[in-house]
Amino acid sequence: MSLKEKVEEALAQVRPALEAHGGNVSLIDVLDDGTVQVELEGACKGCPMSQMTLTMGIERHLKEALPEVTSVQNVSGPSSR
């Protein structure tokens, strides 16, 4: 299983919490250095707490589940894909 597939599985575990607040997260890419690029969606996209959600929620969970993940970046919009 590729790292990208593992990241997608790990994100599936945090999605219910995001969806409960009207948000979501999409995996954009996993870079060779272990950086995971995601896009916050829905209520998460414009939320003032989105950076905290990203670092304390999503990034923490991914790093615990997958030690090869080094960081998580929020990229926005279809032009980033």
Image: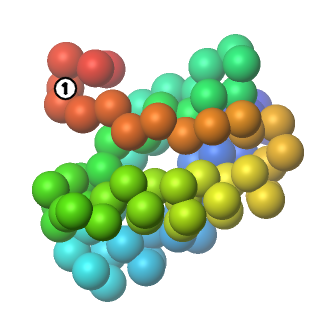
Q: Amino acid at mark 1?
A: Pro
Q: Is residue 22 above or below residue 67?
A: below
Q: Is residue 51 left or right of residue 44?
A: right
Q: Residues within 10 Å of mark 1 (few under 14, many from 20)?
A: few
Q: Is residue 25 visible?
A: yes
Q: Is residue 9 visible?
A: no
What residue do we see at 82% from left, 36% from top?
68
Residue 29 lies, in percent from the top left, at 50, 27
**Residue extending furthest toward the bottom:** 20
Task: Identify which residue, 48 or 38, lies in the foreground.
Answer: 48
Residue 19, image quadrant: bottom left
Residue 42 lies, in percent from the top left, at 17, 60
Q: Colour mode?
A: rainbow
Q: Quadrant of the C terminus?
A: top left
Q: Is residue 73 left or right of residue 62?
A: left
Q: Is residue 11 above or below residue 72?
A: below
Count of numbered circles on the image: 1
Residue 43 lies, in percent from the top left, at 17, 66
What residue do we see at 33% from left, 42% from top?
39
Q: Quadrant of the N terminus?
A: top right
Q: Is residue 4 above or below residue 57?
A: above
What residue do we see at 70% from left, 27% from top?
34
The residue tagged 1 is 78
What residue do we see at 43% from left, 79% from top?
17
Q: Is residue 74 above or below residue 45?
A: above
Q: Which secondary structure lies at badge 1?
A: helix
Residue 32 lies, in percent from the top left, at 70, 15
